[in-house]
Image (cartoon, helix red, strand yellow):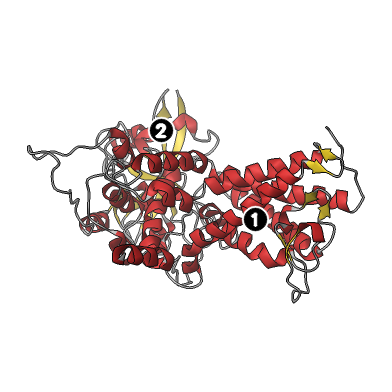
Amino acid sequence: MSERTFRIYRGMQQQGEIVAYRVEISEGMVVLDALHDIQEQQAPDLAVRWNCKAGKCGSCSAEVNGMPRLTCMTRIDELPADQPITVTPMQAFPVIKDLVTDVSSNYAANKSIPAFKPRSPDAPDGSWRFYQYEVDRAQEFKKCIECFLCQDVCHVLRSHGKHEEFIGPAFLVRVAAYETHPIDVEDRSTYVKEHGGIGYCNITKCCTEVCPEHITITDNAIIPLKERVVDRHYDPLRRLIQMVRRTG
Amino acid sequence: MEASVAISRAEGLGRTLRRDRWWVAPLSVAVGLGICGAYATWAIFQGRNYFAEPYLSPFYSPCLGAQCPEEIRLLEFGWWPMSPAILLMWVILGFRGTCYYYRKAYYRAYFIDPPACAVGEHRGHRYRGETAFPFVLQNLHRYFLYLSAFILAFLWYDSLKAFFFEDGFGVGVGTIVLLVNVGLLTGYTFGCHSLRHLVGGNVDCYSCAQFGDGRHRLWRGATFFNRNHMAWAWTSLIYVCLADLYVRLVASGIITDLRIL
């Protein structure tokens, strides 16, 4: 058994402070275990959002030593042993209390996405036919657990506060899941450009770096969507060819 | 509870609660791109020592302009007074400058927007990303791809020509240098995100689309190269400078090309 110091943000949005706690560490402990220990032994009013403790619900997102992480998947023995461990709430969202943030802007972004629109069924029983390889791309995006770590690390939201103009990487992933699905027929390229604000993304790939599900957010979701926007809005040659094809 | 200190969340240029050496990556990129950029600029403006039969520096291919030696001249632009490389270098600069990987690299390293993940940046400026001029022009990447593919074809031609010496077929160190160079540039080009989109990424239903199976195969091929696009980008960038340097050293007589075969 050894002891580690945890420096934890305590307070609300406007006023808060870092408070230090000493916690006894046992083998295999994760940061969320330490937070629970502090709650139980030293600070029963410490606000922490959590649920599954298995890296699948996306509830316990916070910043550990400055990096957005799931606290339930961050082992204490992987953090530098000679320094205190700092845990702060996600910086891109308003603090409700301590480590709990108001992520409701994400729900608004989600609602704005044009819904999945399947083509007419392929079979009389109302079902569709497609191959597994055709849906592989969309299934990668379905791994998203909505932890919002990608939203948190995205500098467009985090540093520039463009929550109104930019839906963020998590929802560009959702758009990509619909757009690349073999039976979806909706064209969301204008939505992604105008409402989704994809032009704000300058592809610095931090979203990919922090994703706990290892979704290749930038290369497989955002850049392909940017290319679809180019098809539709920035490629006069392609539009000319399409016009000639239609009239021909 | 031990103690409490006044807090704040890490905001402002360079401010962060990260404890690792986050500044190493952007600094390395800034230095690396700076060195390669400086060398390429110097080499392009030289206008000499770029051809040592049968080797042509990749910066000068295809060779346009009256200054090019007759045996490698593609077109004679009598009106062009400067180094032939300048005539086409804007294509390569445009292709690399609008490349999705390099955008990440220089936005972080030179524009510090952001300098690294979860590191504060200057908040005073009105951030517009790639929605407005000049960065909205990044959307022209696919046009630079088309033009670069044209230059790549000439580089393949040059690398094959490098097997043919005055006394017939042979292999010199320069032959291998140019062949590896064009191989790396091909890997970089084949992994281009725009190419990946154009060959098949823009298809949703491969089984419904015309030539769907073929386009899916092409998309998978581009995806294979795309996975390591950063590695292709760096190795091809460094190597093209080294290939130019090799031809330059041979052409200026500082070293002699070694014939292997």
Which chain does tag 1 point to? B
- Residue closer to the observer: A9 or B158: B158
Residue B30: mark in rendering:
1
Q: Tell me the crowding category of disc 2: few under 14, some 14 to 19, or many 20 or more residues within 10 angstroms, Cα based.
A: some
- Residue closer to the observer: A79 or A38: A79
Which quadrant does the N terminus of chain A fall into?
Answer: top left
Q: Tell me the crowding category of disc 1: few under 14, some 14 to 19, or many 20 or more residues within 10 angstroms, Cα based.
A: some
Q: Residue at x 43, y 55 (%)?
A: B7
Farthest-out residue, right = B253
Which chain does tag 2 point to? A
Q: Say what secondary structure mark 2 lies in.
A: strand
How far across and how far down the image is residue A145, in percent? Answer: 29, 41
Res. B214 image quadrant: top left
Q: Residue at x 28, y 40 (%)?
A: B207
Residue A23: mark in rendering:
2
Q: Say what secondary structure mark 1 lies in.
A: helix
How far across and how far down the image is residue B42, in percent? Answer: 78, 62
- Residue closer to the observer: B168 or B36: B168
- Residue closer to the observer: A161 or B158: B158
How far across and how far down the image is residue A142, in percent? Answer: 28, 40
Which quadrant does the C terminus of chain A fall into?
Answer: bottom left
In the drawing, does residue B219 fall left or right of residue B235? left
Residue B244: mark in rendering:
none
In the drawing, does residue A4 fall left or right of residue B153? left
Q: Nearer the viewer, mark 1 or mark 2?
A: 1
Q: Is residue A41 above or below residue B40?
A: above
Three-letter amino acid code of the residue under disc 1: Ala
Three-letter amino acid code of the residue under disc 2: Val
Q: Is residue B175 visible?
A: yes
Q: How many marks?
A: 2
Q: Residue at x 42, y 51 (%)?
A: B197
Q: Estimate the spatial distance between the alpha carbons at disc 1 and disc 2, rounded to whole Å.
A: 41 Å
